[in-house]
Image (cartoon, coloured by chain):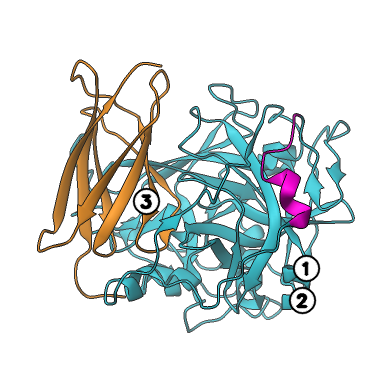
Amino acid sequence: MSASHKITPHRVASHKIKAANEDAAPVPSSGPHTPVSNLDLEHAGKSVRQPKTQAPSAGRDAGGAAPADGETERVGGAAGPRAAAEAARTLSVPATKLRDIGEASFGSPPPMAETVHGPDDRRQITDTAAHPWRMHASLLIVARDNSQWIGTGWFIGPRTLMTAGHVIHIKNSGVPGRDGWVKSVQVMPGRNGSALPHGSVTSTSFRSVTGWTDNGDQNFDYGAIILPTDLGNTTGWFGFGAYPDADLVASTGNISGYPGDKPSGTQWYDSRKIASVDARKVYYDIDTAGGQSGSAVYRIVNGARMAFAIHAYGGAVTNSGTRINSEVYNNMVAWKAAT
Amino acid sequence: MSASPPHLIEGRVVDAAGAPVPMASVYFVEGPVALPDIAALTGPDGSFRLSAPGAGAYTLGVRSDGHKPAAATVQVGGGRLVAVLEIVLVPE
């Protein structure tokens, strides 16, 4: 590995973002959901007043878009071994919340964590150039110490992708020179191995919140990547919403992303019922692997793909993501308007 | 968050001849706590460094195109801040 590049101060520091005008959504100016960026910005752009949902877009030339099949995607090939027994299975809901990383440093360890629970039910997506799969992007991340990582992001607007906070801002790594905003993220929508059907764009503009960047709290592990182009107008983007508990626990969650345990740059999909929720997290048994951090956790509502969480962790009993609650939603609305 | 530094898992991925395998993905498969679902890519010398947030046994998965997937388990803690391992990949 080459030596660490010198980072100019304005890219190392986190800058709090002020609302653009009086009509801005109620983006907090203090507390753990306070939005921050690696860039020194005057404002984060326009936003709307207290919306509940944001609509998706299919992008350009989506006439051949793959239809959804009820609550899940219609994917070619046989269902995985676990899907066949899905209807008869009773979900195991954790009796207690999963422990976060910081808590775990103090106490006795809980049961072993894993991200694929039982038989691996993921199926490979091969028509990744088409909607909806092209809304998911393979990410190649270069950290401050020049170490490289893979993750997943998803479009919420022409220039904005959501991902996990730890994908764009590394916290508490223990490795000298690694922590902080990453240097760059190469975004490859609809990647399929070495094929990049929609090209790639490299971003150096990121957003997150102080709950993650200052405190490293996994309850606030979310962020955004701002592109220098409007590639999202081609790929389309997810809708998203802040939903009541009852809606979420009755939903089937869908995740597609770019795991590191499969051939390089291939996209894999799985779906399952949501296991449980709390105010800031959603828990599920949808199979994932390292590299799928940042994936959309979404439901299909009348054919519309609506994200409700950002996948982030493999857990002891279930996997989990950061819930799009009202504060996360408001930040996403502001970030979606970024230019 | 804990004020104590995390443990580190350092290692190298090599092929059967001992040559470094760059750009292999290295990720957590199992661990004592919930873990970020991200994957590291090995450097030109096949090296990687992952943060282990607490003491316990961690299983890492490794994948590189053209090689069979591999896994290795390492025990973290016991007074050591850094655990070191070497993972050998064999051709598919």
Q: Chain of mark 2?
A: A
Residue drawn at the location 55% of the way across and 32% of the way down: A200
> Is residue A247 found left or right of A18 in the rendered image?
right
* Residue B87 place in picture, x, y as percent: 25, 32
Stretch of the chain drawn in magenta:
A77-88
- Chain that is coloured cyan in the picture: A
Q: Chain of mark 3?
A: A
Looking at marks 3 and 2 on the same chain, the residue that comes earlier in the sequence is marked by: 3
Read off the residue under disc 1. A250
**In the rendered image, residues at marks 3 and 1 fall on the same chain:** yes
Read off the residue under disc 3. A182
> Is residue A63 found left or right of A225 in the rendered image?
right
**In the rendered image, residues at marks 1 and 2 fall on the same chain:** yes
> Which quadrant holds the N terminus of chain A?
top left
Q: Amino acid at mark 2?
A: Ala
Q: Tell me whether circle 1 and circle 2 mark residues in contact (CB < 8 Å).
A: yes
* Residue A159 place in picture, x, y as percent: 63, 48
Q: Is residue A294 above or below residue A278?
A: above
A87 or B69: which is nearer to us? A87
> Is residue A294 found left or right of A100 in the rendered image?
right
- Chain that is coloured orange in the picture: B
Label placed on residue A246: 2
Q: Amino acid at mark 3?
A: Val
A313 or A306: which is nearer to us? A313
Label placed on residue A230: none
Residue drawn at the location 45% of the way across and 69% of the way down: A218
Which quarter of the figure has residue A270? top right
Which quarter of the figure has residue A199? top right
